[in-house]
Amino acid sequence: MLEFQYQMKVFYKDVDQMGIVYYSRYLEYFEAARTEMLSSIGLDYDKVEEKGAMLPVIEAHVEYKKGAVFGQNITIHTSIISRPKVRMKFNYKITPTDSDDVLVSGYTTHAFTNVDGKPIKAPLYIRNLLKNHID
Amino acid sequence: MLEFQYQMKVFYKDVDQMGIVYYSRYLEYFEAARTEMLSSIGLDYDKVEEKGAMLPVIEAHVEYKKGAVFGQNITIHTSIISRPKVRMKFNYKITPTDSDDVLVSGYTTHAFTNVDGKPIKAPLYIRNLLKNHID
Amino acid sequence: MLEFQYQMKVFYKDVDQMGIVYYSRYLEYFEAARTEMLSSIGLDYDKVEEKGAMLPVIEAHVEYKKGAVFGQNITIHTSIISRPKVRMKFNYKITPTDSDDVLVSGYTTHAFTNVDGKPIKAPLYIRNLLKNHID
Amino acid sequence: MLEFQYQMKVFYKDVDQMGIVYYSRYLEYFEAARTEMLSSIGLDYDKVEEKGAMLPVIEAHVEYKKGAVFGQNITIHTSIISRPKVRMKFNYKITPTDSDDVLVSGYTTHAFTNVDGKPIKAPLYIRNLLKNHID
């Protein structure tokens, strides 16, 4: 299993009238976390696009337990459990940085496509990079 | 079943480097659609909050088939199938306004809470409003 | 002077913890308004890009008098006063739809560039379209 | 003069169809930078609100020289030049983290108000904190 922890702080721009992070913003936090996880194993997403592949999301799921609030330091715990073939699934769990209390959890599933959006198998260099980290 | 169609246009602010709407923005479109659906039966969300109830989202799910693009007129088809008790579920389907082609589909589930965030049953006036529309 | 009024409604996604629209969102409202104003005279922005020109913003200015609130119907009053040469300036004024009370005002200045980002003069077909509306 | 440098990375969520950060997002970057600058001198914005003051923006100005791109590490250089009385002005300059090339510059001006939005003078504890840093 490939795991990564991305830390960030909640700013005013994401907090709604109820005083908690607006529900769509967590998908933005998920994106930052998965981008940094891939980067941590040498897979920069801009390089992926340059090499002719894209990873469009085909499914996203979020469960909201408790809202993150302004000024809060949070950690997005991200993981990939299975080696990707034609799809890649990321799992996410958001906690306050100083606790195990789960605020939000979810997953996103992505397809591999070429630049024209046609589905392709996971490029070999990506599978090679990931197999060092995922059994 | 309560149904509603919300029409809108895609602007530059929501379109990403791939030339399609960024994946979190559809949750914003869902919000506009459900707000207008409730408003269409006399249930303005600001009034709901004033009367002491809130409808925080507890689950969101999105399936992405095809990205909406800049300048596109799209319709968000929203529905509530079951009368709410402690939760209310909205279904969504986004199509181009001039076709039946499904671009994105999904749902959100909401809980009823009081202003302190404590779960409550759906307020009577909301159940009464909805039972005129949902068998 | 070319003038246009764009009407819209404020949704939850844009409202912050103070209960008013977050300060950056008005620039998104300005974009929708200027896009629709240009479209109203036959100048669809996606066509502009297809024809090889871009209109990147080079300056934006906003003055905040009073915040727009959730559920409010607002009108963005947009205008172009001078015929564009190498730059085009849009003025904006946001009011509640049912009053003259100015909530926010501002302007954006845009340059004409080719697809490589090199400054160009306003394309002839754009100047021709605009000169029918601006003395 | 109070100065602060806030470093961040550009993610996909902020990048538009032209491949550069959408023009409103820089105001979000400005917010993060000024929040962290104030925090660096012991002035956490959530505490400011708790103590009964707010700092709504009354003016924002942005000049766009060159767009930040996906994956880029950028630094927001923020400063306050004058001690605040009834208003506080922040200046911003965004550069790539590894260069002096100015991508974007701007400023925001904020008023001090009480929780009802009525203008007030800068609270004494804020003036005291700032006078240690600004001549």
Image (cartoon, coloured by chain):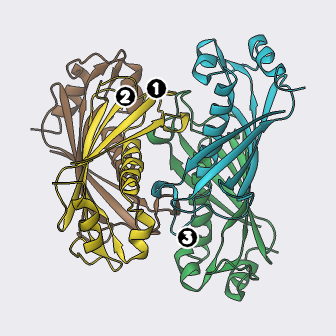
Chain colours: A cyan, B green, C brown, D yellow
Is B101 on the left-hand or right-hand side of A88? left
The quadrant in which residue D110 appears is bottom left
Q: Nearer the viewer, mark 1 or mark 3?
A: 3
Q: Which mark is residue D67?
A: 2
Residue C31 placement, left or right of D60: right
Is C1 placed above or below D49 here? Answer: above
Mark 3 residue element: loop
Residue beneath label 3, please?
A18
State how far apart marks 2 and 1 are (Cα).
8 Å
Question: Looking at numbered disc 1 in the image, what kind of residue is underneath it?
Answer: Gly
Q: In the structure shown, which secondary structural element does the residue marked by tag 1 occupy?
A: loop
- The residue under the point 21% across, 61% down is D131
The type of residue carrying mark 2 is Gly
- Distance CA(mark 3)–CA(mark 2): 33 Å
Which residue in the protein does label 1 denote? D19
Using the rendered image of the protein, determine whether residue D62 is visible from the camera's viewpoint.
no
Kind of residue at disc 3: Met
Subunit under mark 2? D
**D123 over A51 or under it: above or below:** below
Q: Quadrant of residue A31?
A: top right
Q: CA distance from mark 1 to mark 3?
A: 34 Å
Quarter of the image with the N terminus of chain B in it? bottom right
Q: Residue at x 77, y 72 (%)?
A: B87
C88 is higher (above) or lower (below) than D78 = above
Q: Furthest residue to the front?
A: D132
Badge 1 vs badge 3, beta-carbon distance below 8 Å = no
Residue B109 is situated, as x and y percent measured from the top left of the image, at 74, 63
Residue A134 percent location from the top left of the image: 85, 26
